[in-house]
Amino acid sequence: MDEKGVDKLFSGLSPEQQKQVMSILSDKEQTQKILDTPQAQKLMKKLMGEGKNG
């Protein structure tokens, strides 16, 4: 995701939600735990366009 995509994502969040997301992303271990969940894997595939051509 590019910087514009991140800005667009953040524009829909309240300042408190933005703070929470940044807190999670700044903690490498916590971020990895989230990324390892099946839900995150599915979302990443969707965002990256996998499955559209096959």
Image (tube, rainbow, N blue to C red):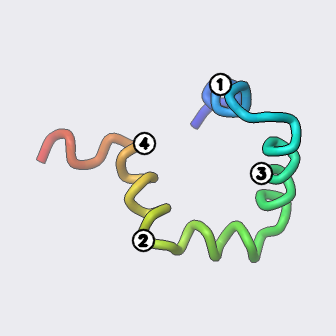
Query: Does residue 24 appear to the left or right of 39 in the view shown?
Result: right
Which residue position is annotated with label 3?
21
Q: What is the three-letter code of the residue carrying label 1?
A: Lys
Instruction: Using the image as rendered, state which of residue 37 and residue 4 is in the foreground.
Output: 37
Which residue position is annotated with label 1?
8
**Tag 1 or tag 4, which sits nearer the N-term?**
1
Q: In which quarter of the image is residue 1?
A: top right
**Tag 1 or tag 3, which sits nearer the N-term?**
1
**Tag 4 or tag 3, which sits nearer the N-term?**
3
Which residue position is annotated with label 4?
47
Instruction: Using the image as rendered, state which of residue 31 and residue 20 is in the foreground.
Output: 20
- The residue tagged with tag 3: helix, strand or loop? helix
Q: What is the three-letter code of the residue carrying label 3?
A: Val
Contact (Cβ within 8 Å) of mark 3 with mark 4: no
**Tag 2 or tag 4, which sits nearer the N-term?**
2
Percent x, y for residue 54? 12, 48
Percent x, y for residue 9? 64, 32
Which residue position is annotated with label 2?
38
**Tag 2 or tag 3, which sits nearer the N-term?**
3
Category of crowding for the residue at label 3, using alpha-carbon neighbours closer than 10 angstroms: few (below 14), some (14–19), many (at least 20) = some
- Looking at the image, the residue that sits furthest to the left is 54
Above or below residue 8? Residue 21 is below
**Tag 2 or tag 1, which sits nearer the N-term?**
1
Q: What is the three-letter code of the residue carrying label 2?
A: Pro
Q: Quadrant of residue 4?
A: top right
Contact (Cβ within 8 Å) of mark 3 with mark 2: no
